[in-house]
Amino acid sequence: TLDTKAARSLPVFISQTYEVHRGDLFDREYAFLLCRGEERPTPAEVEKHLKLARSALGPNVAFVFLTLPTYDRKRLIQRRIPFVVPGRQTYLPVALIDLREKPKGGQRHLGKPREHLSAPAQVVLLYHLQTKEDSGEWPLRKWVDVVGYSRSTLTRVYKELSAVSLCTTVASGRHVTLAFPRERRELWESAFPHLRSPVRTRSRARVQDEKLPIYAAGMTALTELTMIGPGREKVYAMSSAAFEAAREDRKLVQAEYPEEGTVQIERWKYAPGLLSSDSQTVDRLSLYLSLKDDLDERIQAALTELLEQMR
Protein backbone atom coordinates (compact mmCIF):
# COMPACT_ATOMS: atom_id res chain seq x y z
CA THR A 1 0.00 0.00 0.00
CA LEU A 2 1.15 3.56 -0.72
CA ASP A 3 2.52 5.28 2.40
CA THR A 4 2.58 9.05 1.84
CA LYS A 5 3.26 9.72 5.53
CA ALA A 6 6.48 7.70 5.41
CA ALA A 7 7.53 9.54 2.27
CA ARG A 8 7.39 12.84 4.16
CA SER A 9 9.96 11.54 6.66
CA LEU A 10 12.53 11.12 3.88
CA PRO A 11 14.84 13.80 2.47
CA VAL A 12 13.07 15.73 -0.27
CA PHE A 13 15.30 14.53 -3.10
CA ILE A 14 14.58 10.89 -2.17
CA SER A 15 10.81 11.38 -1.88
CA GLN A 16 10.88 13.01 -5.32
CA THR A 17 12.65 9.97 -6.76
CA TYR A 18 10.67 7.16 -5.11
CA GLU A 19 7.16 6.30 -3.98
CA VAL A 20 7.06 4.54 -0.59
CA HIS A 21 4.89 1.44 -0.36
CA ARG A 22 4.40 -0.85 2.64
CA GLY A 23 4.03 -4.61 2.40
CA ASP A 24 4.59 -7.86 4.32
CA LEU A 25 6.95 -10.51 3.03
CA PHE A 26 7.98 -13.65 4.93
CA ASP A 27 6.56 -12.23 8.18
CA ARG A 28 8.54 -9.04 7.77
CA GLU A 29 7.18 -5.60 7.01
CA TYR A 30 9.07 -3.90 4.21
CA ALA A 31 9.20 -0.36 2.96
CA PHE A 32 9.40 -0.68 -0.83
CA LEU A 33 10.83 2.36 -2.62
CA LEU A 34 9.42 2.39 -6.14
CA CYS A 35 11.64 4.27 -8.57
CA ARG A 36 9.17 6.35 -10.57
CA GLY A 37 11.39 8.61 -12.67
CA GLU A 38 12.69 7.89 -16.16
CA GLU A 39 16.28 8.41 -14.99
CA ARG A 40 17.30 5.49 -12.80
CA PRO A 41 19.80 6.34 -10.00
CA THR A 42 23.22 4.73 -10.28
CA PRO A 43 24.06 1.85 -7.89
CA ALA A 44 26.38 4.19 -5.95
CA GLU A 45 23.53 6.68 -5.53
CA VAL A 46 21.10 3.91 -4.51
CA GLU A 47 23.56 2.83 -1.81
CA LYS A 48 23.45 6.33 -0.32
CA HIS A 49 19.65 6.41 -0.60
CA LEU A 50 19.45 3.08 1.24
CA LYS A 51 21.35 4.41 4.27
CA LEU A 52 19.11 7.47 4.49
CA ALA A 53 15.93 5.44 3.97
CA ARG A 54 16.88 2.91 6.67
CA SER A 55 17.51 5.68 9.19
CA ALA A 56 14.00 7.03 8.54
CA LEU A 57 11.97 3.89 7.77
CA GLY A 58 13.74 1.07 9.60
CA PRO A 59 16.06 -1.74 8.46
CA ASN A 60 13.70 -3.53 6.06
CA VAL A 61 13.95 -1.37 2.95
CA ALA A 62 13.99 -2.60 -0.64
CA PHE A 63 14.03 -0.77 -3.96
CA VAL A 64 11.61 -1.56 -6.76
CA PHE A 65 12.71 -1.00 -10.37
CA LEU A 66 10.40 -1.69 -13.30
CA THR A 67 13.46 -2.47 -15.46
CA LEU A 68 17.03 -3.16 -14.41
CA PRO A 69 19.95 -3.93 -16.78
CA THR A 70 22.11 -6.88 -15.80
CA TYR A 71 25.20 -4.74 -15.26
CA ASP A 72 23.34 -2.55 -12.72
CA ARG A 73 21.85 -5.63 -11.07
CA LYS A 74 25.32 -7.09 -10.49
CA ARG A 75 26.55 -3.85 -8.98
CA LEU A 76 23.54 -3.68 -6.61
CA ILE A 77 24.23 -7.25 -5.51
CA GLN A 78 27.91 -6.43 -4.92
CA ARG A 79 26.74 -3.67 -2.57
CA ARG A 80 24.11 -5.99 -0.97
CA ILE A 81 21.31 -3.56 -1.82
CA PRO A 82 17.84 -5.24 -1.64
CA PHE A 83 15.78 -4.83 -4.80
CA VAL A 84 12.83 -6.22 -6.71
CA VAL A 85 12.08 -6.17 -10.43
CA PRO A 86 8.39 -7.18 -10.49
CA GLY A 87 7.81 -10.48 -12.22
CA ARG A 88 11.51 -10.97 -12.97
CA GLN A 89 14.06 -10.82 -10.12
CA THR A 90 14.15 -10.45 -6.35
CA TYR A 91 17.19 -9.85 -4.17
CA LEU A 92 16.37 -9.62 -0.46
CA PRO A 93 19.49 -11.04 1.24
CA VAL A 94 17.83 -11.78 4.58
CA ALA A 95 14.64 -13.21 3.09
CA LEU A 96 14.68 -14.32 -0.53
CA ILE A 97 16.97 -14.38 -3.54
CA ASP A 98 15.49 -15.19 -6.95
CA LEU A 99 17.73 -14.00 -9.77
CA ARG A 100 16.48 -16.22 -12.57
CA GLU A 101 15.91 -14.42 -15.84
CA LYS A 102 12.20 -14.73 -16.49
CA PRO A 103 11.21 -13.85 -20.08
CA LYS A 104 8.28 -11.54 -20.57
CA GLY A 105 5.08 -12.73 -22.15
CA GLY A 106 6.11 -16.33 -22.73
CA GLN A 107 8.82 -15.55 -25.29
CA ARG A 108 9.94 -18.51 -27.37
CA HIS A 109 13.46 -19.06 -28.60
CA LEU A 110 14.65 -20.89 -31.68
CA GLY A 111 16.45 -23.92 -30.35
CA LYS A 112 18.41 -24.09 -27.12
CA PRO A 113 20.12 -20.73 -26.49
CA ARG A 114 23.81 -20.58 -25.54
CA GLU A 115 24.72 -19.08 -22.19
CA HIS A 116 27.17 -16.77 -23.97
CA LEU A 117 27.52 -15.74 -27.58
CA SER A 118 30.48 -16.98 -29.58
CA ALA A 119 33.19 -14.47 -30.45
CA PRO A 120 31.92 -13.99 -34.07
CA ALA A 121 28.33 -13.46 -32.86
CA GLN A 122 29.52 -10.93 -30.28
CA VAL A 123 31.51 -9.08 -32.95
CA VAL A 124 28.49 -8.81 -35.26
CA LEU A 125 26.26 -7.58 -32.43
CA LEU A 126 28.78 -5.03 -31.13
CA TYR A 127 29.47 -3.81 -34.66
CA HIS A 128 25.76 -3.17 -35.19
CA LEU A 129 25.44 -1.42 -31.82
CA GLN A 130 28.31 0.97 -32.56
CA THR A 131 28.31 1.62 -36.28
CA LYS A 132 26.84 4.87 -37.56
CA GLU A 133 25.66 3.07 -40.68
CA ASP A 134 22.14 1.68 -40.92
CA SER A 135 23.11 -1.94 -40.26
CA GLY A 136 19.66 -2.92 -38.98
CA GLU A 137 18.82 -4.97 -42.10
CA TRP A 138 21.98 -6.11 -43.85
CA PRO A 139 22.11 -9.26 -46.00
CA LEU A 140 24.47 -11.98 -44.88
CA ARG A 141 26.86 -11.28 -47.78
CA LYS A 142 27.25 -7.70 -46.52
CA TRP A 143 28.25 -8.97 -43.08
CA VAL A 144 30.77 -11.32 -44.71
CA ASP A 145 32.41 -8.30 -46.36
CA VAL A 146 32.32 -6.12 -43.22
CA VAL A 147 33.62 -8.46 -40.52
CA GLY A 148 35.58 -10.90 -42.70
CA TYR A 149 34.08 -14.12 -41.35
CA SER A 150 33.09 -16.89 -43.76
CA ARG A 151 29.51 -17.40 -44.84
CA SER A 152 29.30 -20.64 -42.87
CA THR A 153 30.46 -18.79 -39.72
CA LEU A 154 27.91 -16.02 -40.33
CA THR A 155 25.21 -18.67 -40.75
CA ARG A 156 26.02 -19.96 -37.27
CA VAL A 157 26.05 -16.36 -36.01
CA TYR A 158 22.53 -15.55 -37.14
CA LYS A 159 21.25 -18.82 -35.65
CA GLU A 160 22.86 -17.91 -32.32
CA LEU A 161 21.44 -14.40 -32.31
CA SER A 162 18.00 -15.64 -33.33
CA ALA A 163 18.05 -18.30 -30.59
CA VAL A 164 18.25 -15.60 -27.91
CA SER A 165 15.85 -13.22 -29.70
CA LEU A 166 18.50 -10.60 -30.49
CA CYS A 167 17.80 -10.56 -34.22
CA THR A 168 15.38 -11.90 -36.78
CA THR A 169 16.17 -13.33 -40.18
CA VAL A 170 14.43 -13.18 -43.52
CA ALA A 171 15.29 -15.78 -46.16
CA SER A 172 14.63 -15.32 -49.85
CA GLY A 173 16.07 -18.20 -51.83
CA ARG A 174 19.77 -18.35 -50.93
CA HIS A 175 19.79 -14.79 -49.60
CA VAL A 176 19.43 -14.23 -45.86
CA THR A 177 18.95 -10.84 -44.22
CA LEU A 178 19.79 -10.18 -40.57
CA ALA A 179 17.38 -7.71 -38.99
CA PHE A 180 17.88 -5.95 -35.65
CA PRO A 181 14.45 -4.44 -35.00
CA ARG A 182 15.11 -3.06 -31.51
CA GLU A 183 16.53 0.33 -30.61
CA ARG A 184 20.24 0.05 -29.85
CA ARG A 185 19.97 0.84 -26.11
CA GLU A 186 17.25 -1.77 -25.59
CA LEU A 187 19.20 -4.29 -27.67
CA TRP A 188 22.36 -3.73 -25.58
CA GLU A 189 20.45 -4.32 -22.34
CA SER A 190 18.84 -7.49 -23.72
CA ALA A 191 22.14 -8.77 -25.08
CA PHE A 192 24.25 -8.00 -22.01
CA PRO A 193 23.62 -11.32 -20.17
CA HIS A 194 24.93 -13.16 -23.26
CA LEU A 195 28.10 -11.09 -23.67
CA ARG A 196 31.45 -11.67 -22.02
CA SER A 197 34.86 -10.12 -21.74
CA PRO A 198 36.87 -10.40 -24.96
CA VAL A 199 40.07 -10.90 -22.94
CA ARG A 200 41.44 -14.43 -23.07
CA THR A 201 44.65 -13.85 -21.08
CA ARG A 202 46.91 -11.00 -19.94
CA SER A 203 50.69 -10.90 -19.88
CA ARG A 204 53.53 -8.40 -19.93
CA ALA A 205 55.88 -7.86 -22.83
CA ARG A 206 58.34 -5.55 -24.47
CA VAL A 207 57.18 -4.41 -27.88
CA GLN A 208 60.08 -4.55 -30.35
CA ASP A 209 58.17 -3.43 -33.46
CA GLU A 210 56.18 -0.19 -33.42
CA LYS A 211 54.09 -1.41 -36.37
CA LEU A 212 52.51 -4.26 -34.40
CA PRO A 213 48.67 -4.33 -34.64
CA ILE A 214 48.04 -3.33 -31.02
CA TYR A 215 45.24 -1.13 -29.65
CA ALA A 216 45.00 0.90 -26.46
CA ALA A 217 42.87 -1.13 -24.02
CA GLY A 218 42.08 -1.49 -20.32
CA MET A 219 42.89 1.52 -18.15
CA THR A 220 44.90 3.09 -20.97
CA ALA A 221 41.82 3.27 -23.20
CA LEU A 222 39.49 4.18 -20.33
CA THR A 223 41.75 7.13 -19.47
CA GLU A 224 41.58 8.36 -23.06
CA LEU A 225 37.79 8.09 -23.22
CA THR A 226 36.69 9.24 -19.74
CA MET A 227 37.82 11.49 -16.88
CA ILE A 228 39.47 8.70 -14.87
CA GLY A 229 43.19 8.99 -14.10
CA PRO A 230 45.78 6.73 -15.78
CA GLY A 231 46.71 3.29 -14.51
CA ARG A 232 50.16 2.17 -13.42
CA GLU A 233 51.16 0.67 -16.76
CA LYS A 234 50.15 0.91 -20.38
CA VAL A 235 47.65 -1.69 -21.56
CA TYR A 236 47.19 -2.83 -25.16
CA ALA A 237 45.07 -5.48 -26.89
CA MET A 238 45.70 -7.77 -29.82
CA SER A 239 44.21 -11.01 -31.05
CA SER A 240 45.65 -14.26 -29.72
CA ALA A 241 46.77 -15.21 -33.23
CA ALA A 242 48.55 -11.88 -33.74
CA PHE A 243 50.22 -12.22 -30.33
CA GLU A 244 51.56 -15.69 -31.10
CA ALA A 245 52.83 -14.59 -34.52
CA ALA A 246 54.56 -11.53 -33.03
CA ARG A 247 56.17 -13.62 -30.31
CA GLU A 248 57.49 -16.14 -32.84
CA ASP A 249 58.94 -13.33 -34.95
CA ARG A 250 60.47 -11.70 -31.85
CA LYS A 251 58.46 -8.55 -32.49
CA LEU A 252 57.50 -8.69 -28.83
CA VAL A 253 59.24 -10.42 -25.94
CA GLN A 254 57.29 -11.59 -22.91
CA ALA A 255 58.32 -10.42 -19.44
CA GLU A 256 57.41 -11.86 -16.05
CA TYR A 257 57.37 -8.63 -14.07
CA PRO A 258 56.57 -4.98 -14.79
CA GLU A 259 59.80 -3.21 -15.63
CA GLU A 260 60.83 -0.12 -17.52
CA GLY A 261 59.74 -0.54 -21.13
CA THR A 262 57.18 -3.30 -20.51
CA VAL A 263 53.46 -3.03 -21.21
CA GLN A 264 50.51 -5.23 -20.42
CA ILE A 265 49.13 -7.13 -23.41
CA GLU A 266 45.58 -8.46 -23.47
CA ARG A 267 45.07 -11.38 -25.84
CA TRP A 268 41.54 -11.12 -27.20
CA LYS A 269 39.17 -13.79 -28.49
CA TYR A 270 38.58 -11.64 -31.58
CA ALA A 271 40.73 -9.11 -33.39
CA PRO A 272 40.26 -5.67 -31.73
CA GLY A 273 40.68 -4.03 -35.14
CA LEU A 274 37.35 -5.45 -36.31
CA LEU A 275 35.53 -2.98 -34.04
CA SER A 276 38.03 -0.18 -33.50
CA SER A 277 36.77 3.10 -34.95
CA ASP A 278 40.17 4.81 -35.15
CA SER A 279 42.65 1.90 -35.53
CA GLN A 280 44.30 3.00 -32.26
CA THR A 281 41.88 2.27 -29.41
CA VAL A 282 39.57 -0.69 -28.75
CA ASP A 283 35.84 -0.10 -29.17
CA ARG A 284 33.86 1.23 -26.21
CA LEU A 285 31.56 -1.74 -25.65
CA SER A 286 34.34 -4.31 -25.74
CA LEU A 287 36.27 -2.08 -23.33
CA TYR A 288 33.24 -2.01 -21.04
CA LEU A 289 32.97 -5.81 -21.13
CA SER A 290 36.69 -6.21 -20.38
CA LEU A 291 36.41 -4.14 -17.18
CA LYS A 292 32.81 -4.71 -16.03
CA ASP A 293 33.77 -7.11 -13.21
CA ASP A 294 36.37 -4.78 -11.67
CA LEU A 295 35.15 -3.80 -8.18
CA ASP A 296 36.99 -0.45 -8.10
CA GLU A 297 34.27 2.21 -7.73
CA ARG A 298 36.29 4.71 -9.80
CA ILE A 299 36.39 2.26 -12.69
CA GLN A 300 32.68 1.50 -12.36
CA ALA A 301 31.90 5.23 -12.43
CA ALA A 302 34.07 5.65 -15.54
CA LEU A 303 32.31 2.73 -17.22
CA THR A 304 28.95 4.36 -16.51
CA GLU A 305 30.31 7.55 -18.11
CA LEU A 306 31.47 5.48 -21.08
CA LEU A 307 27.95 4.16 -21.70
CA GLU A 308 26.40 7.60 -21.21
CA GLN A 309 28.60 8.90 -24.03
CA MET A 310 26.90 6.47 -26.40
CA ARG A 311 23.31 7.54 -25.73
Image (cartoon, helix red, strand yellow):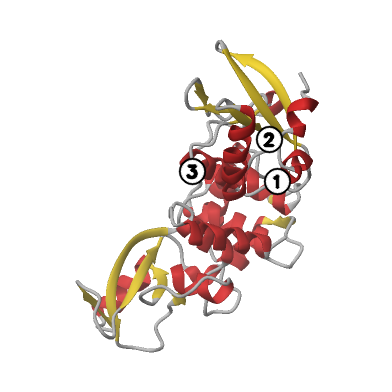
Identify which amino acid the numbered label 1 is placed on: Arg
Task: Mark 3 or mark 2: name the one nearer the start of the chain.
Answer: 2
Residue 217 at least partly seen: no
Per the image, the residue denoted by label 1 is 40
Task: Mark 3 or mark 1: name the one nearer the start of the chain.
Answer: 1
Foreground tag (3 vs 1): 1
What's the mark number on residue 65? 2
What's the mark number on residue 116? 3
The reply to whether callout 3 and callout 2 are in contact (CB within 8 Å) is no
Which quarter of the rendering shows the C terminus? bottom right
Closer-to-camera residue (78/238):
78
What residue is rendered at 60% in x and 58% in y? Answer: 304
What residue is rendered at 34% in x and 88% in y? Answer: 209
The reply to whether callout 2 and callout 1 are in contact (CB within 8 Å) is yes
Identify which amino acid the numbered label 2 is placed on: Phe
Q: Secondary structure at mark 1?
A: loop
Q: How many marks?
A: 3
Q: Position of residue 23 (x, y in %)?
A: 67, 17
Q: Position of residue 96 (x, y in %)?
A: 51, 21
Q: Residues within 10 Å of mark 1 (few under 14, many from 20)?
A: some
Q: Position of residue 254 (x, y in %)?
A: 23, 75
